[in-house]
Image (cartoon, rainbow, N blue to C red):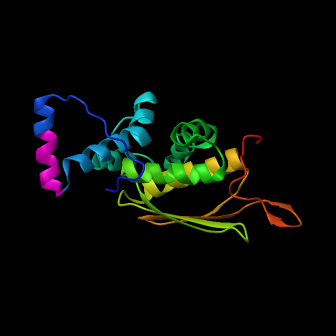
Amino acid sequence: MSNKNTVVRAIRIDSTLDKTITEIAEKKGLSFNLLVNQVLSKYSEYDRVSDKLRFVDIPPSTLRNLLNLISKEESEKIGELSGFSGKNAKQLITLLTGGTDLECFISALKILEKYSGAFTSEISKNEELGEFKIIMSHNLGVKWSHFLKGMISSTLREVYGIEASFEVTETFVNASFSLPKKNERGYESILVASSSR
């Protein structure tokens, strides 16, 4: 790890905790310092928000079993009503990133991808044309794809005034959308805040 933009801080930790962290770092092939930085980064970027909002961790097998009890349409509707969808998403995006514009939404998606384990994503954009594509992949089945579709579509529609087109499969959700045209110069920048919407 580079010393650039770092600080040295001495802290006291419980000896049992020190032993546990040392053992885990060795198993992962990491230095003690790097593992501690990863833990602190996760707390700073995600855990402080998930704790505040009382997120509940569900094992993938349990989630898949729950989704098997409902229809695809119901899965999508639950996605539309989840904590990271529609108007609810605005507060979560702000807590995770400090803003609410479309760039913050994409940053929040990447944070959720990094720490929730619910999906992986590839996001491509052509700002000149105002065209965006979000590809989310997972291994939780087609009903989880519909949940993710509901989550993303309601957020884009209710927070940003964007209607996206979707392709849904057993393991993928592809969302494509264009930014609304603002003036003769082209499309609204991805960095324009959506707070007025």
Magenta residues, start to end = 20-29
Determine whether, in the image, residue 151 is placed left or right of residue 52. Answer: right
Up-down relation of residue 63 to residue 164 (above or below): above
Camera-side residue: 175 or 28?
28
Counting from the top left corner in percent of width and height, residue 174 is at: 54, 66
Query: In this view of the protein, which residue sits in the foreground, 102 or 72?
Result: 102
Q: Position of residue 2 (x, y in %)?
A: 34, 56
| Magenta segment includes 147 | no
User: Residue 67, percent across and down?
Assistant: 39, 48
Q: Is residue 30 above or below residue 57?
A: below
The quadrant in which residue 126 appears is: bottom right
* Spot occupied by residue 36 in the image (x, y as percentages of width and height): 26, 43
- Residue sitting nearer the eye, 132 or 137: 132
Report if residue 71 is visible in the image: no
Residue ID at (10%, 32%)? 16
Dominant secondary structure (helix, strand or loop) of the stretch shown in magenta: helix
- Report which quarter residue 39 is drawn in: top left
Q: Residue at x 62, y 47 (%)?
A: 155
86 to the left or right of 78: right
Which residue sits at x=46%, y=65%?
A: 172
* Count of numbered circles on the image: 0
**Residue 133 relative to residue 20: left or right:** right
69, 21: nearer the viewer: 21
